[in-house]
Image (spheres, rainbow, N blue to C red):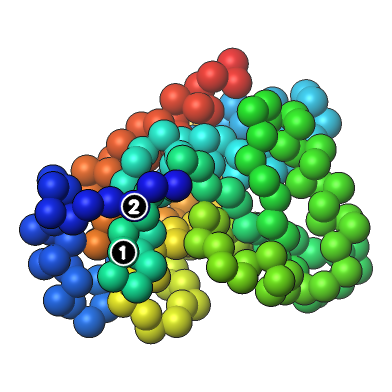
Amino acid sequence: MKEINLDTWERKQHFMFFKAVAYPIYNITFDVDVTLVRMWAQEQKVSFNLALIYLSMKAMNSVENFRYRLRGETVVLHEITHPSFTDMNPGSELFKMVNAPMQDEIKTFIVKAKEISQKQTVYFPFEEWVGRDDFVFFSLLPWVSFSAIDHTVNLKQGDAVPRVTLGKFREEKNRVLLPYNVQVNHLFVDGIHLGKFKDALDREIAGLA
């Protein structure tokens, strides 16, 4: 992690422009072709959701703007961010938030994330969040194929932790499409960066072939 010198930062004017806005947070929903992810997960007998979370994090970490955070008046840039995702115990309707560190390899991530979730006994690991903002929050919504969604957030102007929601996939013309929502803060993330993320996610998925 490094601190950004605002005086020499190329984005300073955009940052200051959106910092004057009371609520610079916005979101976008689009379809992602997850045909290869579903096939790969079935062949490897692993979690589809964890596979897609890993691929999403690889793509998001590849776009610098998704790794900026605001701490008071200081802008910091993380080298890498990690997923915090919703999961449910068998037979329960109550979700829990699970923090899983990123790994270099997708299968290693899936195994470790599954182990962490199975061992976790609390719904919200508050102690693990204290003093940290290097997360991306994932909500899994496999019961609904949505076209738009809002996220639960504190009304904090400087909250720059991205939120992602994965919806119920559908089959269409021999493809599997999944509604995918991303919430970001305009302090750091513009439309072009969302486009770069979507392209990177498509490439990560294509790499499974």
Is 18 in front, or is 59?
Answer: 18
Give residue 93's position: percent from left, percent from top. 80, 74
Q: Quadrant of the C terminus?
A: top right
Res 194 visible: no
The residues bearing labels 1 and 2 have C-alpha atoms spaced at a distance of 7 Å
Q: Which mark is residue 3?
A: 2
Give residue 36's position: percent from left, percent from top. 59, 27
What residue is shown at x 68% (from left), y 30% (from top)? 106
Label 1 is placed on what type of residue? Thr
What residue is shown at x 80% (from left), y 41% (from top)? 112
Is 94 in front, or is 118?
Answer: 118
Instruction: Choose top left, top right, bottom left or bottom right for residue 166.
Output: bottom right
User: Do tag 1 and tag 2 residues touch (Cβ < 8 Å)?
Assistant: yes
33 relative to 70 in the view: left or right: right
Bin the neighbour count of mark 1 within 10 Å (Cα to Cα): few under 14, some 14-19, many 20 and up. Answer: few
105 relative to 169 in the view: left or right: right
Q: How many marks?
A: 2
Label 2 is placed on what type of residue? Glu
Dot 1: element: strand
Is 9 in front, or is 50?
Answer: 9
Give residue 14's position: percent from left, percent from top. 12, 58
The residue where tag 1 is placed is 74
Give the answer, above or below, for where 144 lies relative to 48.
below
What residue is shown at x 63% (from left), y 58% (from top)? 84
5 relative to 103 in the view: left or right: left
What residue is shown at x 86% (from left), y 47% (from top)? 115
94 relative to 204 in the view: left or right: right
